[in-house]
């Protein structure tokens, strides 16, 4: 299983599934990260947290812990 956290800089991946429960999953979905959406990884901070991605035409910073909950292919 590959997650958004494992994705390299400059890669575009497709969201397969969201893991997690309740408010955390809802927050990820509210940011626009839903099943079937393409996500482009723009940058990763020097210490690896947060990760900057482009989703639905806008830039978004997501924590590593949240990125681990997004399964991609």
Image: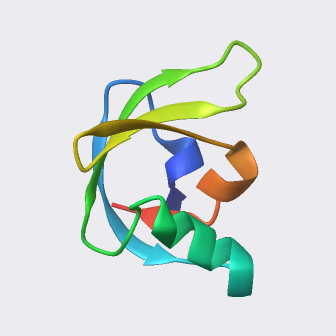
For the point 39% across and 61% down, the residue is 32
Q: Is residue 25 left or right of residue 12?
A: right
Locate residue 66: give its quadrant.
bottom right
| Farthest-out residue, top | 46
Q: Quadrant of the C terminus?
A: bottom left
Residue 71 on image: x %, y %: 48, 66
Q: Is residue 2 left or right of residue 24?
A: left
Residue 34, image x and y in percent?
37, 71
Front position in the image: 41 or 28: 28
Which of the 4 image quadrants contains residue 36? bottom left
Q: Is residue 21 in view?
A: no
- In the displayed structure, 73 sits above or below 26; it is above
Say left or right for 61 vs 10: right
Residue 41 visible to the viewer: yes
8 and 34: which one is in front?
A: 34
Which residue is farthest bottom? 22
């Amino acid at each position: 299983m590959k997650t958004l956290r494992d994705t390299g800089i400059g890669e575009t991946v497709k969201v397969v599934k969201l893991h997690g429960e309740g408010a955390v999953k809802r927050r990820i979905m509210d940011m626009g990260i839903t099943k079937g959406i393409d996500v482009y990884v723009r940058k990763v901070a020097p210490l690896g947290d947060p990760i900057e991605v482009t989703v639905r035409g806008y830039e978004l910073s997501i924590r590593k812990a949240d990125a681990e909950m997004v399964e991609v292919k």
